[in-house]
Image: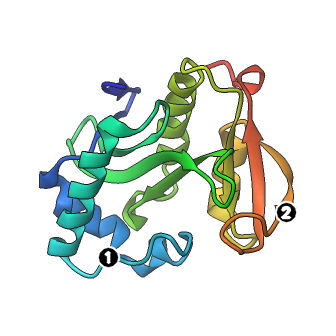
Amino acid sequence: MGVLTTERLVVREWELDDADAALEIYGVDKVTRWLTPAMGQIADTDAMRLLLQAWIEDQPNMLPPRGRWAIQRRDTDEVIGGLGIRLLPPYEEDLELSWQLRPEAWGHGYAAEAGAALISWAFTQEIDELFAVARPSNTRAIGTAKRLGMTWVGETDKYYNLRLQVFRIRPSDLIDG
């Protein structure tokens, strides 16, 4: 993918040096309680570094638009979040867009800004749609999905054996910026 740049953000591949910043996302209960069972809370910097190493090694083998990326502020170079596109279980047919931000970055529109850039790029990779899933009580994620122009398509327990709200976006749904 290379690097995506928005007005305030850079979306780029993860680096091992991001471990401390990534732990402030994936090591925080306020964030990880909303994640799927496939991704638990990370205990310490060493564990975060091992997970980043796995993500970095997996990235070249993933068919675009799949992958995991860091969200970095342009003005401070601070890593404030992560984005991902991956196959949803159990059938591995639907592509899920996910986003996670450190709590201090919530409420500034960063997830929607970075997500919109990633969606635009993803639709250059010969895919027809992307999905986002959120627990019904995760109002922040639901709000971000709507700000991204995603349409609510229902509630299901098909993914992760959890009751989840499902949102979808197709190329024809893109919001003109």
User: Going 68% across and 63% down the picture, which residue do you hit?
Assistant: 134
Q: Which residue is mark 1?
A: 42
Q: Does the residue at mark 2 contact the one at mark 1 (Cβ under 8 Å)?
A: no
Instruction: Report which residue position mark 2 lands on.
Output: 155
Element class at badge 1? loop
In-front residue for pair 109/34: 34
Quadrant location of residue 120? top right
Judging depth in this view, the residue of 143 and 15 nearest the camera is: 15
Of mark 2 and mark 1, the one earlier in the sequence is 1
Percent x, y for residue 112? 56, 42
Q: Whole-percent x and y of residue 11? A: 35, 36
Image coordinates for residue 154, horizontal then vertical, percent: 87, 56
x and y, in percent, of residue 40 in the image = 43, 77
Quadrant (top left/top right/bottom left/bottom right) for the C terminus? top right
**Vertically, is 20 above or below 126?**
below
Which one is in front, 60 or 117?
A: 60
Q: Amino acid at mark 1?
A: Ile
